[in-house]
Image (tube, rainbow, N blue to C red):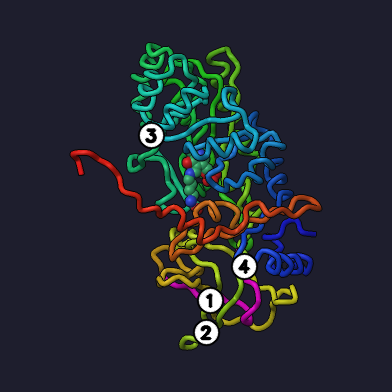
Amino acid sequence: AASDISTRLGTGERDGALITALAATVGTPFWLYDAARIESQIARLRGFDTIRYAQKASSNLDLLRVMRRNGVKIDAVSNGEITRALAAGYQAGGDDLVFTADIFDRPTLERVAELGIPVNCGSPDMIDQIAAVSPGHRIWLRVNPGFGHGHSNKTNTGGPFSKHGIWYEQLPELGPRIKAAGLELVGLHMHIGSGVDYGHLERVGDAMIEAYRALGLPVQAVSAGGGLSVPYHDGGSEIDTEHYVKQWDSARLAIQQHQSAPVEMEIEPGRFLVAAAGCLVAEVRAVKQVAERYFVVVDAGFNDLARPAMYGSYHRIGFVDAAGVPVTGAAHPVAVAGPLCESGDVFTQGDGGVVEFRDLPLPAVGDFCVFADAGAYGAAMSSNYNSRPLIPEVVIDGGEVRLARRRQTMDELLALETGETLSLGDAA
Ligand code: LLP
């Protein structure tokens, strides 16, 4: 009954009972994930040889272990994400882990070289830097195919205005450079954005074939990147993953036939796997009338869920009363806001920060507010703004409910602020 919690949001009484029980146990606000919902999304992508989870979407160790037991591999974009993957039981050295970035910071370059973690190079400089410290290293090339798309300009990662990837026109000169450097080319990778519409996604397979021809080296694999969108709005359409798999399979085959050596295909989703599996639960602390409309103010802010403030992103909202029963009744124009001392701390806003009022039933103080489809880029993008500690994460997994992360304490935050004197010699 606890499955699919965010899509049945506010309509399932057992979900409501679970929310009130958790609020009493861990306090509000908190994140809640459903492992079964993640697993049903994984199943939809099984046509790919490898599913590689872009853990930046939600990187709790508990969720990484759920991925691992389902045979899902891992993309890491920082030294910290490498540490997380290893802590969750993934192995360095094989192909469990790939490090994807546009630069190496110095400690990460040292670490991937030492552990033999394949790197997905998003700049020619990365190719030279890894070749210098780790001869024969396994690399991928992340290619910017000259076009991109995203649910927001801030999530478009292709085209001439994007800092990401290697510009496709530079591939012909990179083939010989990789060969001369003695690196092992694993494959080509394209990630053109996040929350991509299907029309743009469909173009990537052909762009991959062209990139392969331009590079002129054999590949072991191609990666479709991530970017698959999910329906955030009621009635939004689902991606036809079967069609998508078929399309990639034909790109894969074309390359395989050309080089007469096997090519595997990977996909690297973040959002698609975890968005609908998670929600944010907060408590309603004030219901204010402002002119002829209402502000419902809850105890979670954009330091917890940043997406509406950052991109004008839409999350469905439902209320559950203190007894666990979904709040129904006449709809009123309602904006839902948080406690931060900043006027942009509103969960119902469009791109550009204009506050939007939705037709919602009015909750009472003490009711719970549930933000749906918050499993991707929710907890992962939280901050300590306004000195607010990070909030707990709870995972429902079959019959088990786990505290995947406890609430951070103020003592933990203050412990970083040591104020010790630095000795800088003459530079001081
Ligand atoms: N691969 C690479 C190289 C990426 O940069 C990303 C996302 C992904 C895969 C996964 O993309 P997805 O399947 O989740 O769309 N914070 C934004 C999304 C930023 C995405 C960053 N890169 C949001 O809340 O919408």
Q: Which is in the foreground here, disc 2 or disc 4?
A: 4
Q: Is residue 288 visible?
A: yes
Q: How far is disc 2 from disc 4 in space, using C-alphas?
A: 20 Å
Q: What amino acid is at disc 4? A: Thr
In contact (CB < 8 Å): disc 4 and disc 1: no
Measured as percent of width and height from the top left, residue 268 is found at 56, 37
Measured as percent of width and height from the top left, residue 100 is found at 47, 34
Q: Which residues are magenta?
A: 354-371
Q: What amino acid is at disc 1? A: Val
Measured along the vertical axis of the image, is residue 360 above or below residue 246?
below
**N-terminal-most mark, 3 or 4:** 4
Give the residue at mark 1. Answer: 297
Characterize the local packing of mark 4: few (<14), some (14-19) or many (20 or more) Cα atoms within 10 angstroms. Answer: many
**N-terminal-most mark, 2 or 4:** 4
Give the residue at mark 3. Answer: 105
In contact (CB < 8 Å): disc 2 and disc 4: no
Is 393 a magenta residue?
no
Q: How far is disc 2 from disc 3 in space, using C-alphas?
A: 48 Å
Q: Indicate the secondary structure of the residue bearing disc 1.
A: strand
